[in-house]
Every structure is written in C-alpha cells, then in structure tokens.
Image (cartoon, rainbow, N blue to C red):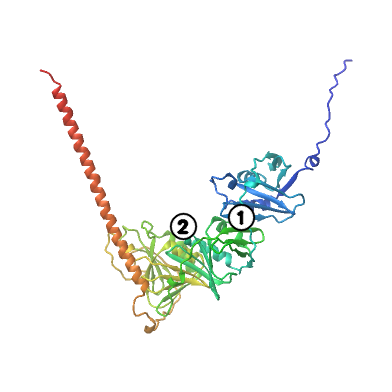
C-alpha cells in the first residue's frame, strides 16, 4: 500500500500581546468620553490653519490623570477624563482628523494610544476587529505654552452659563468694533454685577451675579463657549492678571471636566447704562402669556417684509397685541392678532427689526414696554432685559401705495390677512397713567435719532448723485468708443479708395 507524504507543519510559539506591550506607554480613551471631548475641541481647532500643530490634539497622562487639549493660540480648551490610569507619564500630539475618525469607527470599543519612545500607534476597532495604525506625530515642544492660572477662582451662581450664552448671541461680529465682539462682565458697581452683550442696535443685560473682581472684563465671543457643554454645569471663574498692569489678562472658566483659558478683549466697553431709558408711568406695558410667546415665535419669522434692509415689523399695542408686516410692493398689511396678553397703558405703535425681537422672545423675556415709536423698546423678566432700537416708520411705509395710517379693522370686516384665536380673548382693563407722569418734551435720545436719520437721508441722496454721475460717465465712454469706431471705419474706407489705381 502506497504511503501518503507527511506534511511537516511548524508551530510557532503563541503570540504574547502583553509581552510586546510591556515596554510601551499606553493611554486608553473610552469612546463614551472621547466623543463629547472631540465635539468640544472641534470648536477650537480650525479647519484651515497655517500652523500644522494647531490641527493636533495634545494627549497627556500625568499622575494617572489623562487630558486632551486643543488651542488656536488665543484660547486653550482642556478636557479631563473621569477615570485615572496607571502607568508612566506620557505626552503626545495626535492629528485631530485621525483621532476623530478612530472615534467614529469604534462605536463602543476604546481607542488606545501606544508609544514606545520611537514610534506611536493608535489601536481602534472597525466592525469589531482591532487594527493598529501608525500616527504621524509632531514634536511636543512645538505645542504653544499654556498660560498658568494662579489666581483664585470663585464659583458662579446658577444661571450664569445661560446668561453668558444669551449675551454672546447679541454680540457684534463687526471687526472694526472689537470691544463689542464679546460679552462684558461688568462689576463696576459693588451691589449690581452684570453680563452685557450688544451689537450697537440692541442690547442684552442680566444681573443678580457676583464676580471676584472690581472692574469689567470682556470675554471674546467664540464657538467653544456657545457650542460646547462647558456652561451646562456649575462653573468657576478666575481672572489672571498680567505681569505688568497694562498686560493682557487671561480668563479661566472651569467645571468638572472642562478648563477654558482665553485672552480678554482689550479695550474699554461702552458705558451701556447711559442708553437705558427709565420706565415710568408714561410707558405702555404688555405681559405676554406663554401661549402668546409661542404664537409670536411661529408667526414673526413667516411674515412678509424680508425684502427690505430692516426686516421690520410693526407692533400695535391696543386692547390686544397686533403684529403687522408687508413687502415693499404690497398695498395692504398682513396682520396677526396676539390675544393672550395683559396690557397696561395707552394704545401705541412701534416698528422694530424682527431679527432683534425674536432672540428676546426665545430668552423668555415676556414683559414688553413701549414709550413711543422713536424711543427704544424694552423686554424684560427676572433681572434680564433687552433694549431694542426702533425702526423709523418711514422705513417700512414707503412703497407704491399711499402711506397713511389706517384704523385697526374689526376681525369680521378686515380685508387683509389675519390670524386669530378661535376663542375670544379674556377681557383686560387698560389702565391709563396719570398725565403728570408723562414726559413733557422729547428726550435727547429722540433728537439724536432724528439727526442720524437726517444724515442717513443726506447720504442716500449723495449716493444717488454719485450713481447718476457714474452712469453718465459710462454713457460718455460708450459714445466715445462708438465715435472712434466710426472714424476708424471711415479711415479704412479712405485707404481702400486710395489704393485703387486707374
């Protein structure tokens, strides 16, 4: 019987994973913590940067504490993992895109950084299978120095985070007005500390806070503060002064997981209290019930009138609140009645930019105060207030139709579009204030507004004149080119005639 050939199979010793990793430094990143950390760090890391190091995340393990840090040179955001990890201290710079991709692939499995001093690898999972990928790291010495915060920090009151976010939403983005590109923490008055944000056309302020400094400081508006969960829990604040009195201060906001360090916005914040009008008996006040606020938030964005520069709407304060708007070429107003309101004072009308009114309603400011159509309107509640500059009525009444004020139509005979509640509103008694409480003359602010409007009209006239001159010059240039073309045609004809021989 024929013997089958014998196949020799060499059995290698079992691969000892732990033996290979014995001399390596490891950092384990749980995806449950890594994903929220990367979400916050992405608000600091820019998509485009001239410095490659700013596209990296600094991962450190020191005394068992693991941190992830990102920077844009002006600000530093640091996230601390919840669990301590044993082992030697290690520090490495990992590209953000590579780390983010690994976190997305590893749904529930951990991401591990492996370093042996010569090379760095990242181990993560794809479809449940572990893979290792080399990491092209930069030297740690290229990381910008982190400002040292040695100043005493104080815990902030509940509601600080919400108020700071709201103030940031009202900041200016105009690069020529740097001091308005952030929220001001105003502690100049010992008994009333405020958070203030403004873009020059509307102003937000909130008080009932207490800060551990005696002046004011401006926190720059940035995507990290408004887009991360830094302000979702109790925070502490520290202000680190510079080595010299004129040096830039550093601001440190910190909670259980995050530490955010940024430079202050240099410059003096305007004296915002000078523009705050005093609400007295001559004002008309409206208290918006929750159903009225919900109705306004749905109605205002969908009203016509966004074809102009002011996005203006008209608020008519009578027995109820009526919101009106129209496009430039519309003859009639689109009107919506807001019924669930409490009104105190005389009937009044004011025009405002809807993009300034909507944030105030979203912030929960439900008391609306109006003095007249040229004075700032105030919305307030529980220590928070929004001051909105009005839009002059002529800015939205100029169109092809005659601009004249029409009396408010009855709900049953109105020819314009109107949205009303199916149930009748609750009767509200209008309380007329005493005549002596009304101002006798217009305020200085009205005069300033009128002068600004006159200057604006003058500038418009000048711009129109420049436009007419420009059009005339263009027409003259076209005529000159046409004449030159005709002359050249005649010259060509003369040349052809001269070339003819008899």
Query: Quarter of the image containing the C terminus?
Result: top left
The alpha-carbon separation of the residues under discs 2 and 1 comes to: 22 Å
Depth check: give the residue in front, 376 or 349: 376
Disc on the earlier residue, 2 or 1:
1
Q: Residue furthest front?
A: 244
| Element under disc 2 | loop
Query: Quarter of the image containing the N terminus?
Result: top right
* Residue 480 at x, y percent in the picture: 21, 40
Instruction: Give the quadrant of residue 332.
Output: bottom left
Look at the image and tell me whether residue 53 can be seen: yes
| Element under disc 1 | strand
**Which label number is shown at residue 295?**
none
The residue at which mark 1 appears reads as 77
Residue drawn at (37%, 58%) of the image: 309
* Residue 436 at x, y percent in the picture: 37, 84
Is 145 situated left or right of 333 in this image?
right
The residue at which mark 2 appears reads as 173
**Residue neighbourhood size for the residue with mark 2, other residues' Cα within 10 Å, grouped as few (<14), some (14–19), many (≥20):** few
Look at the image and tell me whether residue 408 can be seen: no
Look at the picture and state if 26 lies above or below 407.
above
């Amino acid at each position: 019987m024929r013997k089958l050939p014998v196949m020799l199979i060499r059995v290698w010793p079992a691969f000892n994973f732990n033996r290979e990793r014995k001399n390596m430094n490891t950092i384990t990143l749980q995806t449950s913590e890594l994903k929220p950390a990367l979400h916050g760090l992405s608000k600091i890391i820019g998509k485009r940067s001239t410095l490659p190091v700013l596209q990296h995340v600094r991962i450190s393990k020191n005394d068992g504490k693991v941190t992830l840090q990102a920077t844009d040179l002006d600000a530093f955001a640091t996230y601390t993992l919840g669990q301590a990890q044993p082992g030697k201290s290690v520090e490495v710079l990992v590209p953000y895109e590579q780390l983010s991709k690994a976190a997305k692939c590893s749904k529930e499995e951990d991401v591990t950084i492996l370093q042996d001093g010569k090379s760095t690898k990242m181990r993560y999972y794809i479809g449940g299978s572990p893979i290792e990928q080399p990491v092209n790291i930069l030297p740690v010495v290229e990381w910008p120095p982190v400002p040292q915060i040695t100043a005493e920090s104080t815990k902030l009151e509940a509601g600080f985070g919400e108020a700071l976010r709201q103030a940031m939403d009202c900041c200016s983005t105009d690069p020529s007005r740097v001091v308005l590109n952030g929220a001001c923490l105003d502690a100049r008055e010992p008994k009333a500390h405020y958070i203030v944000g403004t873009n020059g056309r509307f102003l937000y302020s909130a008080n009932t806070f207490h800060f551990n400094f005696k002046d004011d400081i401006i926190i720059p508006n940035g995507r990290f503060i408004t887009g991360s969960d830094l302000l979702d829990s109790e925070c502490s604040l520290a202000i680190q002064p510079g080595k010299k009195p004129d040096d830039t201060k550093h601001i440190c906001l910190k909670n259980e997981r995050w530490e955010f360090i940024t430079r202050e916005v240099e410059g003096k914040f305007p004296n915002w209290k000078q523009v705050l009008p005093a609400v007295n008996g001559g004002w008309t006040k409206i208290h918006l019930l929750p159903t009225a606020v919900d109705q306004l938030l749905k109605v205002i964005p969908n009203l016509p009138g966004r074809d102009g520069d002011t996005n203006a709407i008209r608020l008519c304060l009578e027995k109820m609140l009526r919101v009106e708007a129209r496009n430039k070429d519309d003859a009639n107003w689109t009107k919506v009645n807001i019924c669930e309101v409490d009104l105190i004072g005389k009937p009044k009308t004011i025009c405002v930019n809807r993009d300034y009114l909507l944030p105030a309603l979203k912030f929960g400011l439900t008391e609306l105060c109006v003095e007249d159509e040229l004075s700032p309107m105030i919305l307030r509640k529980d220590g928070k207030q929004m001051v909105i500059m009005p839009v002059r009525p002529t800015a939205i009444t100029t169109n092809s139709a005659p601009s004249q004020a029409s009396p408010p139509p009855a709900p049953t005979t109105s020819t314009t579009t109107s949205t009303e509640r199916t149930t009748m509103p609750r009767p509200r008694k209008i309380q007329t204030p005493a005549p002596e409480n009304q101002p006798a003359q217009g305020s200085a602010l009205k005069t300033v507004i009128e002068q600004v409007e006159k200057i604006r009209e003058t500038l418009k006239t000048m711009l129109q004149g420049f436009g007419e001159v420009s059009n005339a010059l263009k027409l003259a240039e076209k005529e000159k080119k046409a004449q030159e073309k005709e002359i050249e045609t005649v010259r060509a004809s003369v040349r052809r005639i001269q070339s003819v021989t008899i």
